[in-house]
């Protein structure tokens, strides 16, 4: 959607507006909206997580592709590269830092949001948090909250490592100076 948004201006505005609107829906409300459509359990929680992931990924992909200098685009055009080759060989590598930042943001946010899935029967760490809240048991709440927090930190670290491996070296050196 981010790539499409950057290539087709009118459609891109609609896509970015739509994912922005989805992000403004409170998480509890979004889960409630999922119940009549998908029932209770894991599926509605996963769909809600997917919807919440869209904004940072689409927006960062769009912006990363739009930030590529015009001279680079013109050079690719002068070389006679097809649209697919330009995207694969030039645009995506140059936008990779921005794209990965969006994916990382979505992943870290979703780890925390996933605990809310316990409210609709999706299980996971949210079950312990909900049970602790119902029983007013701080330790039971922490039984769910601490592993979720650790998982978010682990996710952050994994993406930092992935960025070092996936972003072309020349782009990393130029930015890190």
Image (cartoon, rainbow, N blue to C red):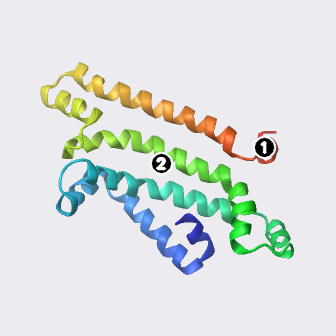
Q: Is residue 1 above or below residue 125?
A: below
For label 1, the residue is: 169
Residue found at the far top of this picture: 139
Residue 99 is left or right of residue 111, and the answer is: right
Q: Which residue is depicted at the point 18% across and 56% down?
A: 39
The mark that comes first in sequence, 1 or 2, is: 2
Residue 47's x, y, as percent?
Answer: 33, 56
Residue 126's x, y, as percent?
Answer: 26, 36
Q: Which residue is depicted at the point 68% across and 59% down?
A: 92
Residue 33's x, y, as percent?
Answer: 23, 60
Tell me, yes or no, whether the two marked residues, 1 and 2, touch with CB atoms within 8 Å. no
Residue 144 is left or right of residue 107, and the answer is: left
Residue 102 is left or right of residue 65, and the answer is: left
Q: Residues within 10 Å of mark 1 (few under 14, many from 20)?
A: few
Which quadrant of the rendered structure holds the C terminus? top right
Front-lying residue, 105 or 81: 81
Q: Say what secondary structure mark 1 lies in.
A: helix
**Quarter of image, res 132:** top left
Q: Residues within 10 Å of mark 2 (few under 14, many from 20)?
A: some
Q: Is residue 118 above or below residue 90?
A: above
Q: Which mark is residue 49?
A: none
Cα–Cα span, label 1 and label 2 = 24 Å
For label 2, the residue is: 106
């Amino acid at each position: 959607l981010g790539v499409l948004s950057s290539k087709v201006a009118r459609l891109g505005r609609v896509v970015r507006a739509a994912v922005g609107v989805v992000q403004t829906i409170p998480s509890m409300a979004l889960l409630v909206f999922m119940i009549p459509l998908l029932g209770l359990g894991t599926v509605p929680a996963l769909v809600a997580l997917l919807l919440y992931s869209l904004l940072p990924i689409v927006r960062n992909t769009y912006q990363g592709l739009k930030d590529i200098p015009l001279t680079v685009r013109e050079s690719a055009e002068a070389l006679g590269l097809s649209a697919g080759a330009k995207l694969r060989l030039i645009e995506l590598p140059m936008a990779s830092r921005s794209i990965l930042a969006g994916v990382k943001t979505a992943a870290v946010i979703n780890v925390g949001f996933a605990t809310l899935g316990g409210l609709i029967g999706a299980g996971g760490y949210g079950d312990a948090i909900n049970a602790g809240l119902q029983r007013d048991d701080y330790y039971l709440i922490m039984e769910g909250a601490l592993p979720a927090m650790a998982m978010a930190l682990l996710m952050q670290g994994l993406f930092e490592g992935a960025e070092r491996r996936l972003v072309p070296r020349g782009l990393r050196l130029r930015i890190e100076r």
